[in-house]
Amino acid sequence: MTIAQGQIFSFIAELIYCIGVLTMISRARKGIKIPELYQVPGLDALDEAIGRCTEMGRPVHFSPGIAGVDEAQTLAGLSILSYVARQCAKYDTDIIATNRRTVVYPIAEEIVKQAFVQEGKIANFKVENVRFISEDQFAYATGVTGIMYREKPAANLLLGAFWAESLIFAEVGATAGAIQIAGTANTHQIPFFVAACDYCLIGEELYAASAYLTREPILMGSLVVQDWGKMFAAVCIVLGVLLQTASVSVLKDIMGK
Amino acid sequence: MKQELPVIIGLAFGLFIVIAMFVGGVPALTTGKNYVDDWFLVVSAWAIAVGVVNLTQIHGRRVQQRREGYQYSLWLMICMFGMAFFGILVAKSADHEGWKFMYNNLIAPMNATVYSTLVFYIGAAAYRAFRVRNVEAAVLLVAAVVMMLGRVPLGTVLLGDWIGDTAEWILNVPNSAGMRGIQIGATLGGIATALRILVGIERAHLGGTGD
Amino acid sequence: MWQKLANIDRRIIYALMILVIALSLIKPVGLAIVPTAETQRVYDFIDALPSGSIVYLGFDFSAGGIPELMPAAHSLVRQGFRKDLRFICAGMWVMAGDMADTAFSIVEEEFPDKEYGVDWINVGYKPGGEVLLQKMLSSIYEAAVGRDHYGNDLKTLPLLNEAPTIKDTDALFIFVTGTPGERQYIAHVSSPHNIPLCVSTISVSVPELMPLIQARQVHAGVLGMKGAAEYEVLVGNPGSATAGMDAQSFSHALIIVFIILGNLGYLLTREK
């Protein structure tokens, strides 16, 4: 039994990282204090967006992105859907959740349904508001565009993995007059969201959303290790640049193992 | 138990796949992973049926109740079932002339049309967003203009080679640096999210709220 | 008056965009296209492959990507067949088989001596995303469930006997617009098995691709329609990408004009 060639460093690094995450979660469980999180305006604005829909008597539109369940961004998006759906249930606001992937659709439906159950408002749950549109990217984009124009949601929440349809959604949302909160870790789509939406979650902020929104210490614990990971990456970059400049390839060799 | 069982199954298969990805030289792992891969393929392929049921339920109800715009729902179902039945019962192969005709003259142009509408959205979004509100916005504006001119022949014709070189520099240096920074953070966030889901700490996707 | 400049109706922007693009396509100016070092590297890489090499082509895009990616695919087929390279095509996107079919539609006219099954195979789309790539590492035949895009038994196609797995190919050249895309090929195929990877991508994905090119996880890239136009010039067959660069040039110029107008309106009304 061996670790595959070229994977040794990433295996060890990921193992240490995972141990760190689990350790911090365990410390949080024991009640050890977790550092405060910095403000994420996009996440703070979620309640404001839902409140706006409640006041205007218009629905919230939520898209967990166009990737499948094998994409962590989709799962992060679905975690936020859980929060948004509960808030919508609490304030008797309709939520339209659109899906591109057939595998994601039943999960989204169950999340929204459970949110209404937990708020004791199952009678308000409308099964037809959680919709599978199409597996085709642009057919899905067209479907969402139609929903935005016809049903005029007052909030457009785009949180997950997006590609070319991102700007279509954001511009159509702007035309419909919706407050728009978008978030993705797909770096090439972030500029579109920044340009066209009211708030934008950039990269890791999307993954931090469930911890941020619930303020559960055990979820927040893992965020601390993310910061350590970033610091480690920064040290490796600086060290790597210095060593390579000095023609010393030791770090590169270790990482290539 | 309704939430525990999916978490246990997820943990078992998740760990198995991670181990199989990294560890070599164990035939049982490779065989097991091949089986799991096959199951994923089968589930992915069959999941389309769930989508068809949902579309039929929603649009069927709309047609049945003659709601506003029910004609579009009817058209959607005719297209969906028409294409499916034609593919399964008549064409049976992607080489079928009728299938190719529908693909080349319906699906491909419609797909390309929606994608090409982006050009209008980009124009409108750029006009709305690129305003010199502050220093950061001014930097964004200048970078956008340099990129737009530097990546097309007209820029070089009008302004010379320097515009293309500057665009290349923006793409290779500040852009790559920013992309890498965001990607490192996002990757770490992705691993932590996956781990939280795998061990069942984050289970909002199961319809719960976590521990 | 100035307020109007800051709030131009988006329909005016849309209408002028249509006009400018249509005019540029109908009456091209023919702005000179000079290949950049990046596209040259792609060309040189393909040129350096020994005759008879087998290149895996990943068609991981749908019809929306045709204007930017298909010209590069046609150029690659031309350059490759002139050098007697052979191709195995597949993809993780639903339209993969149809896209490969379109890419090779030029063969009948331009390369009548090339034969399907011997010089190229179109495995087509198979479901599973990156799992498909993992399965192709052990057997393309099994990953494709034995059939190509046209329903032929893959065992009857001689080229597959020479490259029964994706690891047996000499290079990967993929056409991508999103995910699954280059990252999946890097993670499962090119990096672990040291197979050089070239990528042709759409303009919007270029910024994300740059770090991968710099790190040489991607050997070289055809970057957007500009790259495709340069590749057409290098291969000596200017086509739709070359023509499209005029439209792209003038549409960019129009957007810049609108940005200037918007800022004029914004600054002058703000001062008031």
Image: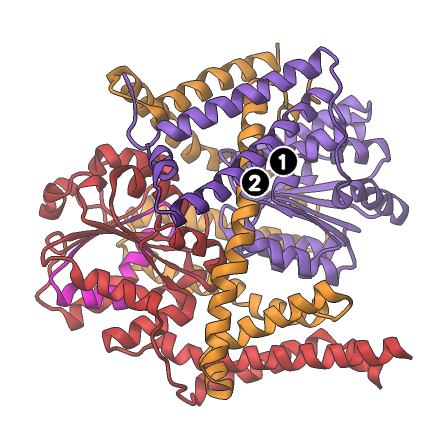
Chain colours: A purple, B orange, C red
Seen from the viewer's position, the closer of residues B108 and C183 is C183
**Quadrant in which residue B102 is drawn:** bottom left
Indicate the quadrant containing the N terminus of chain C: top left, top right, bottom left or bottom right.
bottom right
**Quadrant in which residue C76 is drawn:** bottom left
Q: Residue at x 63, y 23 (%)?
A: B202
- Write down the chain letter for disc 1: A
Magenta stretch, residue numbers:
C73-101
Q: Residue at x 91, y 79 (%)?
A: C272
Q: Residue at x 52, y 22 (%)?
A: A18
Badge 2 is on which residue? Answer: B186
- Write down the chain letter for disc 2: B
**Quadrant in which residue C84 is drawn:** bottom left
Query: Is A75 left or right of C125, judged from the image as shown?
Result: right
Query: Is C79 left or right of A102, judged from the image as shown?
Result: left
Q: Nearer the viewer, mark 1 or mark 2?
A: 2
| Image disc number at residue A134 | none
Q: Residue A125 in the image: x percent, y percent? A: 75, 32
Query: Is A139 left or right of A30, judged from the image as shown?
Result: left
As for residue C85 lying within the magenta part, the answer is yes
Q: Secondary structure at mark 1?
A: helix
| Mark 1 burial class by Cα count in 10 Å: few <14, some 14-19, many 20+ | many
Badge 1 is on which residue? Answer: A207
Q: Amino acid at mark 1?
A: Tyr
Seen from the viewer's position, the closer of residues B177 and C221 is B177
Seen from the viewer's position, the closer of residues B185 and C103 is B185
Residue A112 visible in the picture: no
Gap in angstroms between the C-alphas marked 1 and 2: 8 Å
Q: Are marks 1 and 2 in contact (CB under 8 Å)?
A: yes
Seen from the viewer's position, the closer of residues B102 and C42 is C42
Q: Is residue C149 above or below residue C31?
A: above
